[in-house]
Amino acid sequence: QLQASGGGLVQPGESLRLSCTASGFTFDEYSVGWFRRAPGKEREGISIISWRGDRTYYRNSVKGRFTISRDNAENTVYLEMSSLKPEDTAAYYCARVGLKFRFYTNFSRQLYDYWGQGTLVTVSS
């Protein structure tokens, strides 16, 4: 089970940190990804972090603004978002890569098996 939290309403240029807390499986054996779905748009992948946290991957539009990290002792993956823009407004989801010890530079949904519920981020002045 995955549970995302930390969403809210922020102004453009501000920062926000999302958390994804896991339970029910051996967390440090799985890579985890963050996705988002903006109103009227398809879900898109944002970032992935490997099971040890030593590898990360970002979509181009968030590189340099978003940072993914994890604390395996806390069973949590974080998404630190800075310089937020109105176009970052979306429901944000975390998901587990379906195979142990696999890291992908690929956001294909078929690679992920468990999804958390979304947390809503609204960037507006």
Image (cartoon, helix red, strand yellow):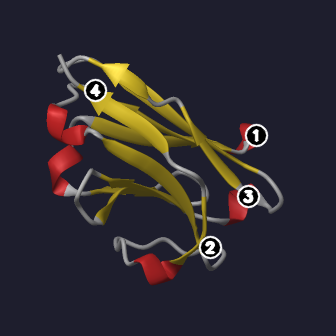
Secondary structure under the numbered disc 3 in the rendered image: loop
Horizontally, residue 29 falls left or right of residue 97, namely: right
Secondary structure under the numbered disc 1 in the rendered image: helix
**Along the polypeptide, which appears first: circle 1 or circle 4?**
1
Q: Which mark is residue 73?
A: 1
Q: Are marks 3 and 2 in contact (CB under 8 Å)?
A: no
Q: Mark 4 — residue?
A: 82
Q: Mark 3 — residue?
A: 1
Q: Position of residue 97 (x, y in %)?
A: 56, 71
Q: For marks 2 and 1, give the CA distance.
A: 17 Å
Residue type highlighted by circle 1 = Ala
**Along the polypeptide, which appears first: circle 3 or circle 2?**
3
Q: For marks 3 and 1, give the CA distance.
A: 16 Å
Q: Nearer the viewer, mark 2 or mark 4?
A: 4
Q: Which mark is residue 114?
A: none
Residue type highlighted by circle 3 = Gln
Horizontally, residue 23 falls left or right of residue 89, namely: right
Q: Position of residue 9 (x, y in %)?
A: 36, 22
Q: Mark 2 — residue?
A: 101
**Along the polypeptide, which appears first: circle 3 or circle 4?**
3
Q: Is residue 68 above or below residue 109?
A: above
Q: For marks 1 and 4, give the CA distance.
A: 25 Å
Q: Is residue 24 above or below residue 4?
A: below
Q: Nearer the viewer, mark 3 or mark 1?
A: 3
Quadrant housing the C terminus: top left
Q: For marks 3 and 2, give the CA distance.
A: 18 Å
Horizontally, residue 40 falls left or right of residue 47, namely: left
Quadrant housing the N terminus: bottom right
Res 80 → quadrant: top left
Residue type highlighted by circle 4 = Ser
